[in-house]
Image (spheres, helix red, strand yellow):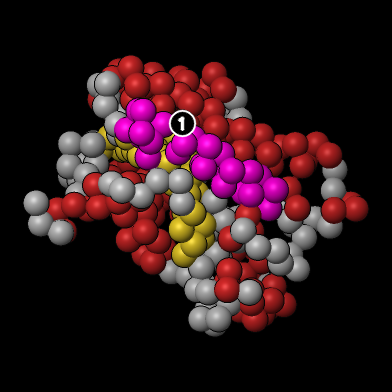
Amino acid sequence: MSVMDLFRLDGRVAVVTGASSGLGVGFAETLAEAGADLVLVARRLDRLEEVGARVEALGRRHLAVQADVSKAEDCHRVVARALEEFGEVHVLVNNAGVGTATPAHKEDPAEFERILATNLSGAYYMAQAFGRACIAGGHGGSVVNIASVMGISGSDLPQVGYSASKAGMLGMTRDLAMQWSARRDIRVNALAPAFFSSELTDPLLADPVGLERVLRRTPMGRVGQLHELSGALLLLASEAGSYITGVTLPVDGGWTLH
């Protein structure tokens, strides 16, 4: 097998949550270009079908599933639908996420709970459903949790709910890797982006003051471009990363150097 073939995902089925916009669209296209069929998951079905058309244009099949990952039953339904359509699942990209920029002393407890329910509990429910399918199928798999530099280091941005959820995701990544990697051949890793253009970050980046705060903290002096996540994603999802598990890989322009 050539070095480049190690990054291929031909014959694999990848599940991507939060696939209706932003980073999720880029992840879906990257995986499809590498040869995977896609299960696209989000709450907005119409947007998923648009992404599915891009996947089909790349020569791969897709299944769009409307779901709210904060509900465990939805996550298990997603995997059941994927098994009905494709027979197996091999890669999970836990990308669904929400966040707000609210000072802690003003934050509504319900909003804090909503963020944790989607970002952390939802990622766990999806990983649990995916892991059960891989174990029942008698084959390995790869989970890539989309965390954030906010889960690694602090900042002057008021996002305690988001930061807490992403820090929790890093602990979940390590624990699942310990449980599943040797006994179940399921690798679990996290990808921690800094600031890339997405629905979640665009309001901040469109504000000159917010953008200046981000750039001041970033040694490379710019926000990331979507394609700059592709290599890291494929490393963790494919056989190229077959001896990597339990790690958090920052793609951050140097943000976590501080």
Residue denoted by label 1: 179
**Amino acid type indicated by mark 1:** Gln
209 and 138: which is toward the camera: 138
Secondary structure at badge 1 equals helix
241 and 98: which is toward the camera: 241
The part of the image, by quadrant, that contains residue 70 is: top right
Residue at (43, 69) in percent of width and height: 225
Where is residue 165 shown, x and y percent of the image?
66, 45
The part of the image, by quadrant, that contains residue 19 is: top left
Q: Is residue 145 left or right of residue 40?
A: right
The part of the image, by quadrant, that contains residue 205 is: bottom right
Residue at (49, 62) in percent of width and height: 250
Regarding residue 57, the answer to whether it shows in the image is: no
Where is residue 200 shown, x and y percent of the image?
60, 55
- Which residues, given as a range, are shown in magenta? 162-187
Q: Is residue 130 left or right of residue 31?
A: right
Q: How many marks?
A: 1
Q: Is residue 189 left or right of residue 97?
A: left
- In the picture, the quarter occupied by the C terminus is bottom right
Where is residue 9 shown, x and y percent of the image?
22, 44
Q: Does 175 lie within the magenta span?
A: yes
Residue at (80, 55) in percent of width and height: 102
Q: Is residue 143 above or below residue 255?
A: above
Residue at (70, 48) in percent of width and height: 164
Are there few (<14), some (14-19), or many (20+) residues within 10 Å of tag 1? some
Where is residue 94 shown, x and y percent of the image?
48, 41
Q: Look at the magenta stretch and give its main secondary structure.
A: helix
